[in-house]
Image: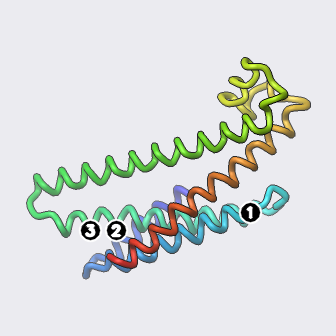
Amino acid sequence: LLGSCAVGSFLGGVLSRKRNNTSYTLIAASFLQLIGTGLLASITQNETGRWAEGLSEAIFGLGVGLSFSGNTIMTSIMIRGPKQRASAQGGVAQARVLGGCLGLTACTVAYNSQVSRYFGNLLNEVEMQLVTRVLLDSPETEGKFLDLVRRVYFAAYDVDFQIMCLVAIPTVLISLLT
């Protein structure tokens, strides 16, 4: 994911090296992100091939990288003067951080709701806190709960990528208007 994001960032710069192609870059980026999240959302827990997940992550990462470079180039082109440009680039960087925080929050809420759904009647309060914080790496998650924790992860994973698809769809529409 990170490698393809880096490739996308580099590619976005190359595409707009001689001419402003940021609109096309952002359209391609949003479509790649939608395709990647859609593919990731369609992977089932019975899927044995990790290549499908890796390919989907690569497509998504390429879209994210293109988006990052497109936004950076667009900000540089639209803002005149070095002081204003620095402020605008800082604003773009902060928007990325905010988006990441919102995404992580949504995924955490989805996971915790799945934990409550699956474990609500099986665990006491201390065990519930352990499962929502430590998860699979904990030695306390062995035995009868390991399979249940895996099911919770898969259920939360599905919800997470459904949320990402719901965010990616308007992104495609907005990019087509740039």
Residue drawn at 45 percent across, 67 percent down: 171
Disc tally is: 3
Do labels 1 and 2 touch, CB within 8 Å?
Answer: no
Residue marked by disc 3: 74
Q: Position of residue 3 (x, y in %)?
A: 53, 59
Contact, CB < 8 Å: mark 2 with mark 3?
Answer: yes
**Real-space CA distance between mark 2 and mark 3, rounded to the nearest whole angstrom:** 6 Å
The structure residue drawn at horizontal position 39% and vertical position 71%, both measured from the top left corner, is 174
- The nearer-to-camera label among 1 and 2 is 1
Q: Amino acid at mark 1?
A: Ile
Disc 2 crowd rating (10 Å Cα; few below 14, some 14-19, many 20+) is: many
User: Disc 1 and disc 3: Cα gap in Å?
Assistant: 34 Å
Mark 1 — residue?
A: 43
Q: Earlier in the sequence, mark 1 or mark 3?
A: 1
Q: Quadrant location of the C terminus? A: bottom left
Query: Where's the N terminus, which quadrant?
Result: bottom right
Position of residue 106 in the picture relative to residue 52 (left or right): left
Q: Residues within 10 Å of mark 3 (few under 14, many from 20)?
A: some
Q: Which residue is mark 2?
A: 70
Residue 141: image location, x then y, percent: 81, 28
Crowdedness of circle 1 by 10 Å Cα count: few (<14), some, many (20+)? some
- Give SS at disc 2: helix
Residue type at mark 2? Gly
